[in-house]
Image (cartoon, helix red, strand yellow):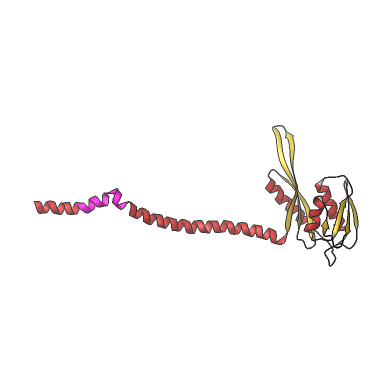
Amino acid sequence: MTEEKVATTEKEAPATVAQAPGAVAPAPRAKNFSRRRGSSGEGGGHGRGRSSKAGNFKRGGARSEFAQKVVGVRRVTRVVAGGRRFTFSVVVVLGDRNGSVGVGTGKALDTALAIEKAIRDAKKNMIKVKRTKTNSISHEVFEKYSSTRIHVFPAPGRGLVAGSSVRSVLDLAGITDVSAKILSRSKNKINNAQAAIEALRQLE
């Protein structure tokens, strides 16, 4: 009887050890944790890599071709039957600093969407400016757009001297050694930018 009891206890011993939660639980958890960590690292790494690559690709594609500058952002309020509805109006100047420049406007409920619309509009209305060998203009130009009147003339050795949105247009067009003066009292950035575009259009 003693031998049978010893045999049963020896047989039951591994069963009790196998059923004990404290002895066996850490081993599979450690293995599963390492596997999950490796799989999450691989999957997470690929996921993060895809998002970062996609973001860099979009940003790099936009920046490599054109440089952009947001000239003005306005919030427009419209009163409707249910209350007030807010939209955003954005003006963007787009250029490659190599003679191509354009001005576009966009309206949307979100600022980011309005900027995208303005960029597409600027690409449609882009012009090519004829420059001299020193990246200046050949002669002075007077232009009037709406209530804005500007005067752009060559200024050798002075760099770019301009203000308001006219400076953004001339800078993104790659024009230097010029001076621009706004002869009117208008402070409308859209009209100032459009007046600069019309002035440069005379140099095509």
Name which residue lies at 67% across and 60% down.
Answer: 61
Main SS, magenta residues:
helix
Q: Residue furthest bottom?
A: 133
Name which residue lies at 52% across and 59% down.
Answer: 46
At which x and y percent is residue 159?
82, 60
Query: Is residue 178 inside the magenta stretch?
Result: no
User: In the rendered picture of this protein, how many numbered marks are placed on residues?
Assistant: 0
At which x and y percent is residue 164?
81, 50
Q: Residue furthest left?
A: 1
For residue 186, what is the image quadrant? top right
For residue 81, what is the image quadrant? top right
Q: Nearer the viewer, residue 75 or 81?
A: 75
Q: Nearer the viewer, residue 57 or 192?
A: 192
Magenta residues, start to end: 12-25
Q: Nearer the viewer, residue 109 or 188?
A: 188
Q: Is residue 19 left or right of residue 181?
A: left
Q: Is residue 81 left or right of residue 188?
A: left
At which x and y percent is residue 99?
80, 62
Quarter holding the C terminus is: bottom right
Query: Is residue 14 inside the magenta stretch?
Result: yes
